[in-house]
Every structure is written in C-alpha cells, then in structure tokens.
Image: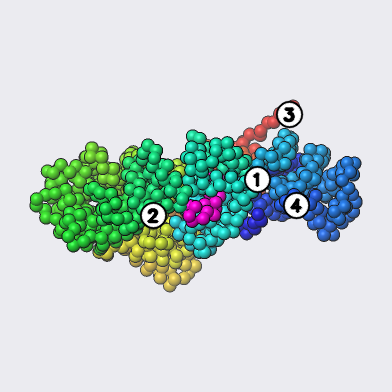
Amino acid sequence: MTQNVTSAPLIGRTQELDRLLGVLERARAGEARAVLIAGDAGVGKTRLLDEVAARAARDGMTVLTGHCVDLGDVGLPYLPFTEVLGVLAGDPRFAPVLAAHPVVERMLGGAADTARDSRLRLFEGMAALLTDLADAAPLLLVLEDLHWADQSSRDLLRFLLSRGVLHRPSGGVAVLASYRADDLHRRHPLRPLLAELVRLPSVERLELRPLADAEVAQLVRALEERPLPDTTVRRIVERAEGNAFYAEELLAATDAEAGGVPSGLADVLLIRFEQLSDTAQQVLRTAAVAGRRVEHDLLRETVGIPEDELESALREAVGRQLLVPGDGDTYAFRHALAREAVYADLLPGERSRLHGAFARLLAARPRRAETAAERAHHYRESHDPAEALAASLEAADHAARVGAPAEELRHLETALDLWPSVDPSARPSGEGVDRVALTLRASSAAAHAGAAHRAVALTRSALAGLDQEADSELAARVRYTLAGNLLTVDNLSAAYAHSSEALALIPAEPPTATWVWAAATHVLVARQVGEKETALELAREALAVAERLGVTDAAADLLISVAVLEGTGRRSLEGRARLRQARELARASGNAPVEMRALFSLAVGAFEAGELEESLPWLTEGLDRARRAGLLSSAYPLEMRYLRLLVLYTLGRWDECLRSSAADADLLPALGRFTSGPAWYVSLARGDLSVADTAGALLKGPFDWMGTLVAGIVRTDAAALAGDAEAAVERMRATVTALTDETGALPDVTVRLAALALSAVADRAAGLRSAGDEDGALRWTETATQLVEAARESAGRGKERAPQGPEGMAWLARAEAEWARATSGPDVDAWAAAVAAFDYGDTYELARCRFRLAEALLTADRREEAATEARAVRETAERLGAAPLLERVEQLIRRGRLADAPADGTSPLTAREQDVLRLLAQGRTNRQIGEALFISGKTASVHVSNILAKLGAASRGEAVAIAYREGLIAPEHTSSG
C-alpha cells in the first residue's frame, strides 16, 4: 500500500516525535542509535518519518531514505540500499565519498557477488560509506516497510546495526526503520531479526498506537476546508478506529458513498483476506455477518464444518492478524473496517441466509435482554420484519432500564421504520404500543440523549400521526411534550402555542394528572415569553391540584417553578428552601429529570447570590444523579456541566476547570459543546486567542441559545484583548440581537458583553484622545454611551423583573468604569466600585479591575496605592498563568516605576521572580525556565524582562552578576567524583 500523507498535518504524535528527535540530537552529539518503528498499516509511520526527516534536513543532517517494496517471491536484493546509493550517485556532493568505495558501487549495477567473502566486503564497504558520510555531517538513514525486505537487505541491516555504523567511536548516525506490525504472521522472516536486534543496547523499539478519537477528529477537520457536520466526523472517527489512512479514505468518500467501505480502501483491506485458504475465508465471511465479535460456539453452529477444520481456519485467520482472540471464548476482527470489507464482499443471498441462521440460533437460546439488539439486527437483515420489530422493542426496553437513551432511541427508530411493513395482526400489542405512543417515547429518548432537534422532529411526527378520534389526553400529552422540546431549542412562540393548546384540550375539572403536567409545561413556557404573573398564578393552582392528587413528581416540578417566579427567585433564601423541598419530592418519586432540574436550580441560585462555593456540592450531586440515570447528555446536566466549569473558572481554579472540561468532552452531544466555554475563557485569559475560532464553530448549524451566548463571550473578549474595537462591538451587538427574545427583552449576558466591548472602545478612545484626534475620540465615546445604556437596561431589567444578582451588578460596575474611561479618562472611584463589586469571588475579573484601578491611581499620582494594587494583580496573574494580564501589569509597574527596592533591604523580586532568577543563573533559556516552572515560555520571558528592569541590568548575564553581588541568590556548589 502506498500512501501520500505528507500533506496531512502531523496530529497526536507529540511524544513519539519528541522521542525520535531526541535520537537525532544524540546522533548529532556523537551517540549512534537505531529505532525500529512498528505500527499497523496506515497508522501514520510514513507521516511521522517524513516529519523527522524534514526536521533533520533543516538541522543540517544528511538524510537518506530507502524503501522496501512488495515484489512477492522474486524480490530484488538490497533494494532499499540500492535506492539510497542511487540518491548518492545522483548528487555531485557525494561523488568523492562514493568513489572511495567501489565495492559498494557494484550494487548499483546489480552485480554484487554473493560469495561469502565478497558479501562481507560489501557489508563492510556499506558500513564504511555510511561512516564517511557521517564524518562530513550527522547522518539519518531511514528504511521504510521492512516487512517487505528481501533476505539480503535483512542481513545487511543486521550487520550495520550489530557490527557496523552503530559501533563507530564517533557516532553521528541515526537509523530509523519502520515495519507493519499487522503483517508479521508467526512465520514471517522479519520476526527473528527483530527479536535479535531489540536486544542490542543501541537499538530501541517504538510502537505507534492508534490515534485517540479526539486526534482523529482533529485530523479530519484539518484535512477538509469546508465545515463538516458533527455526525459525519463522529462516524469517520468511529470507523477509522485511530488509523490515519483509514480516516483520510473515509473522508474522501463522504461525498461519493453513503456508508459502506470506499472501494480503494476495501481493496487494501481484502488483500490479506484473499491470501487465506477457502475454508478460512468461509469462516471469516460467517464471522463478518455475526458482527465485530462472535462467540466460538455460535460461529461453529452457523458455519457448519467439523471442529478441527474450524480451529485450523481460525488459527490461520489469527496468524494473519485478521481475527484476534477475545475474552469469553470469542473472536473479534482486528479492525472494524476489515469486517465491513469482508461483509460487503458477500453475495446478497448469502448474506441474508447467514443472518437468518444467526437469528434462529440466538432465538433458540435462553432469552437474554442484552441479546435483543443482536436478534433484531439479524432478523431485519434476513427480511423478517415482524420478529425484528418485536426484538427492537425488547432492545429499547433493555436500553431504557440500563440508562442508555441514545441506544433506546436507535432501537425505537428502527421499530418505527419497521412498523408499516408488519401486518397489524403481527404487531406487538399492549398499552403504549402504537405508532403515536412509540414516536412520543422516541422523542423523550432523543431529548434525554441530547438530540434536541431530533426530539422536536419526532414529536411533530407524533402530532401529525394523531387522528381525529384520538384520545384528548394523548393529544394533550403530544402537544405539551412538543412544547417542552421546542422550549429546549428556543422556539418560544411555537412552544407557547402548543402548550396553550394542550391546556385547552383538558378541562381543569375533574382534576387529572395530565392536566397537571400540561399546566406545568405551560408555566415554563409562559415564564420564558415574559408572562410571569400568568405563569405564577397557574403554577400555584396546579401545585395545589398535584398535591391533592398525589402526583409527587409534578408537584416537585411546579414547586421549582414557584420558587423561581416568586420574589427574587432562586437566589433568595425562601426560594432555595422551596427548591430543597422540591428536590426531596422529586427524589422520593424517582423522577430523575425533575430531580436534576431542582438540583440545577439550587446550584444556579447559589451562583446568582454570589455564593459560589455553595453551588459546587449541588452541581456534583446533580451530575452524579444524571450519570446514574444515564442522562448526562440531557438539557439540565449539560447546563450543570457548564455551570460547574464556570464556578471553577470564576473561583480561579483554572487547571481544575481545564481537567474537568477535557475529561468527558468527547462524549458530549453536538448541542453540548457550549459546556466547554469556561475552559475557553481560561485559554483566552492565558493568551490563546485562537479559541475564538473554536467557539465560532458553535454558531454553525441550528441555532442554540447557550452556544450563541458562549461564542459571543469568547469572540467579544478575544477581539477586545486583540485591541480590535470594531470587531468587539460588532460581535457584542450580533450576539445580543441573536439572544433577544420575542418580547424584546435584552438577555442578561448583555451587561457582560457590553463591558467586554467597552474595554476595547475605551482603549481606542483614549488612544485617539492622546494623539490629539478629538473628533475620532468623540465618535467612540458615542459608541461607549450606547453600550453602557444597554448594560444598564440589561442589569436593571426594568420594572417587570428584579435586578440581576452580584455577578450582573459587578459587570455593570465594570461597564460604568469603562464608559468613564472612554469619555473622560481613568476614574478612581468608578474602578474602586468595580473592584468592590467583583469581590464576591470572581478572581480574574477582580484582578482585571484592580489593574485598571492601579492605572487610575497612578494617573491621580497616588503611587503607593497604585503599587499595592499592581502587586496584587501581578500575584493573581502569576498564580492563574494569565500571561497577557501579567505582561500588562509588569509594563505598568516598569512605566510607573512602582517596583522600587524596599527601604528594609529585602529583595525587590517576587517569589516567582526569585525562582526564575535561580534558573537564569543556571543558563536556562526562556523555554527551559517555563518547562521547569510549569509556565509558558512567554510568561517566563515577561518575568525575565521584569527582573532586568528591577535590577537595572542590560542583559541576562549582568542581571545574574548583580543578583550574586547583592545577595539575591547564592552561588550553587557542585561536587565531582
């Protein structure tokens, strides 16, 4: 297989690349080494070697590459080495060296003597040639695809590594040789050579593992210029199983083929299969129908051949590494795509017959719920829709019991697809087993799996399937379920229409549970469209009915709504007391979604009250409950995941925030990507402006309220940090427009977005004013006024709603201070108010405001106070790793001369600067200092610059000399012996 992957980005091979580059560095230092690089076909060996070779060439090494080629039983002797010699012969620079070894030149003409003494002279000549080349410049010899090497090439390689170039006294040589691990069957001639070579002290082995799923996804997106749907990327990742070549081939086929294995890839995958005996091929075809994994007994009964023939065929397939033995007397295909290729090669009739055999064998065994999905699959593929329908419903029931909503949805959708093709008399019967009820159940599974838009589509389908004589309670259930799903995707007007219809379909008297749930849903929707009084009145009425009927979970849901709607809502002590009561009721009823709503409301109530630490236990409990119920991808757990990361971010626990975000990011549904927002806030604060593009991907596809909010925050702040006032204002306004509801009420996040944009606007206005452009400054002050007015409206929220809590009011204080800076210059009182407002617990924003306060104090010539604030900012920025803020405060300290040495003779350096100084004295570079102290090289550079400024030094060496002279660091004593 030949693959051209040099144009593909190198992704996910950092450790392997560093290890090989280390081998090159040692070679350049005189230590000869060899690395045998193993990996399956297509895993990325060539791409890695290309990268290493390119870097070696850039560093002045001579790079020679030879390839082994599959020529069957008539391989050309010394082929990879003759390729190397051909390159040398074609380059005039190497003519003198090549001419000095005529015995080697004979290989180019294919006339190498095979006599033993001549062969030894040839081997010694090749070693001498490589040694002479290495004397001129360090040498990298790359040999690819050793699994195809001829015997002569293997012998020459053995000589070079055991007696030749790796044992020359001056080193200067690195040998990298690759081979396919999956091609090495038990009797492969390369096996004994590898076993011999890895025992040599100068030879090591490196195995290239499959890429992680996240790395394959990154590769796929990097290879395709156009945006790809998440479902397409996920499908490629699932099928590629970490193989870069497979991923590229699957990506190339996304437009041409729907499912199946691309023809070019199938040809590659079937090569090894076609080398098997006829019996082994028959066994593998049968196993392919069973699926990725098959039990030995089931395979034996289906294939129908004697046990000894089956075992021989299986041994052959395992030896060729097409199958691998598994636990519990099972066999599995080494790679899923190999199984797909074999399966696709079956004739249609053969495929149907084998599926039927598997279905009947499984059905004849004692019924197990966990095999229902297998039976459903085999029945469907053998064209038995009635049995497939029954098994699909059984599989859906099992998935629901074990908390697997995505799998439940898949089985229910299969059942719905089969429903029309099954005769009514053969369909399962019973309560809740009709097309509308199944569709409604599927919509619920979709919602729990985080597929909100799919949930809406399914509920609309259920609504369309209602006939004129439909039961009014079922009709109401469909409508209020649709309303709830529409609320999740922020279609408020349609949600309100459907919840109103649902409530109208059922009379309040006599009271029923269906009316209670219809009312509970209408309360949620009415609150969202601004009808707070209507919502509160209905909530109280329905709560009384729910309590009278004993519908505990509905009572809990309504109690949550009452707590949110009354007074100052969930942030008040009374509101949170009601929420705790609702949590207990929901837990007692066993309704996990309502319990999670209560826990989320408790957490966000504490957050809105500025009690950040108090919110974390509620979030932990809520996420644990969601995990036990298999509902981590549903709406409230996703909100809780975001809020937990936000609390960690706000408290300044940034590394914990990043770890938590990365822990399960790959498991999130498409609509859950917004939950990574706080981790992006951390990256942004640490200087990575590229996360603005990452967050921008949230704006693609169907509208998502939280995704739009997160993208707006990241992209607005990124523009502000980059000094792009125009982009900051445009992004802020676009986000507010997108999030403004149908009543015209501004979203709460407006105040934060306005404050972020105002920081860039104030910078621009101040810059123009200092340059004497008063007209330009005036235009930006007008913009600043528009932004602060939006902030005031959002935070105050008019007469209908209570003002925002501590977070919102803190952002308003910052917006007011930025507005003052834009219109008239730094205002000490305004920034002092902002500092006081953020003191509720937002570590980073508090530091940003203290930085501006320090600026204002310095402008007012209140130097000691300014120095105090600046030192506090520097300490926080260092602790958080907020490099941009650290750099700005260091500049302020230098510019304002706020770091004069203290009168008591103590060190003018901070503790971190002392650490940096000690490493500086050891001759470390900025990058090495950063690695030692777990900070970025850029942050280390800021520290070094600050040390030079404080010590009045013009160079790093002078700073160290001053530090020794003034006793800031002590000389390090070393001992030898």
> Upstream in the sequence, badge 1 or badge 4?
4
Q: Residue furthest left?
A: 509
Q: Is residue 317 in sight in this rendering?
A: yes
Location of residue 225 with respect to 307 vertically, above or below:
below
* Cα distance between the residues tagged 3 and 4: 45 Å
* Cα distance between the residues tagged 2 and 3: 62 Å
* Cα distance between the residues tagged 1 and 4: 19 Å
Tag in front: 1 or 4: 1
Tag in front: 2 or 1: 1
Q: Which mark is residue 66?
A: 4
* Magenta residues, start to end: 333-351
Q: Main secondary structure of the magenta part?
A: helix
Q: Amino acid at mark 1?
A: Asp
Q: Is residue 219 magenta?
A: no
Crowding at mark 1 (Cα within 10 Å: few <14, some 14-19, many 20+): some
Label 2 residue SS: helix
Q: Which residue is mark 2?
A: 671
Residue 694 placement (x, y as % from top left) = 47, 56
> Upstream in the sequence, badge 3 or badge 4?
4
Q: Do the CB atoms of the residues marked 2 and 1 lie less than 8 Å apart?
A: no
Q: Amino acid at mark 3?
A: Ser
Q: Amino acid at mark 2?
A: Leu
Q: Is residue 350 magenta?
A: yes
> Upstream in the sequence, badge 4 or badge 2?
4
* Image position of 352 (left or right of 599): right
Q: Which residue is mark 1?
A: 183
Q: Do the CB atoms of the residues marked 3 and 4 lie less than 8 Å apart?
A: no
Q: Specify the quadrant that holds the N terminus.
A: bottom right
> Upstream in the sequence, badge 1 or badge 3?
1
Q: Which residue is mark 3?
A: 976
Label 3 residue SS: loop
